[in-house]
Amino acid sequence: MERRSRAAGDPDKPEEGKRYYRIGEVSKITGVKPYVLRYWETEFRWMAPAKSRSKQRMYRQRDIETIHLIKKLLYEQRFTIAGARQRLREMGVGRAAEAPGVDIESHPRAHLRRIKAELQALRAML
């Protein structure tokens, strides 16, 4: 008998109110294999999810939406990895972690990206 974490509803949809998803759940929701998600973390550095104390990847809803977007760019629109990375940069998706309401203390990469962006803005003013 298959064990399901959701009593009712579509297994390919994220649960309402759930904050974090493990890589297996994200794989089922997005239709992207876990090894591909891990590879995308290396190619899209800002996509790296937070990790629990036990070093498990913990994805948020925003991460799942980004994965859907990357999947669309790569598989439907036939972008290369470099092209998808550039397109996401143009769309400002890489800066999503800097949006209001994000706890910067728990996301050091987002904090470093914000500092880098601020330094680049200062450099451009000189």
Image (cartoon, helix red, strand yellow):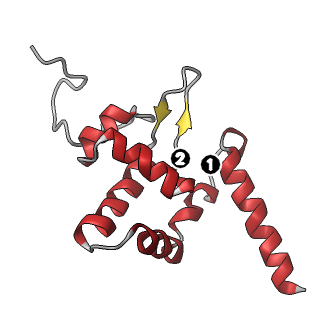
Where residue 68 appears, as percent x and y from the top left, is 32, 57
Q: Nearer the viewer, residue 99 or 79?
A: 79
User: How many other residues sit within 10 Å of disc 1, few (<14), some (14-19) or many (≥20)?
Assistant: few
Instruction: Left or right? Give the position of 94 relative to 103.
Output: left
Identify which amino acid the numbered label 1 is placed on: Val
In the orientation shown, which residue stands out farthest toward the right?
A: 126
Q: Viewer-proximal residue, 23 or 11?
A: 23
Judge the density around disc 2: few (<14), some (14-19), many (≥20) Cα neighbours within 10 Å.
Answer: some
Of marks 2 and 1, the one in the foreground: 2
| Quadrant (top left, top right, bottom left, bottom right) of the C terminus | bottom right
Element type at mark 1: loop
Residue 48: mark = 2
Q: Earlier in the sequence, mark 2 or mark 1?
A: 2
Q: Which residue is mark 1?
A: 102
Q: Amino acid at mark 2?
A: Ala
- Relative placement, left or right, of 79 versus 2 is right
Q: Residue at x 47, y 70 (%)?
A: 88
Q: How many marks are shown on the rendered structure?
A: 2
- Residue 5 picture location, percent across and down: 25, 23
Element class at badge 2: loop
Between residues 18 and 53, which one lies in front from this camera angle? Answer: 53
Residue displayed at 48% across by 68% down = 85
Q: Which mark is residue 126?
A: none
Residue 62 in view (yes/no): no
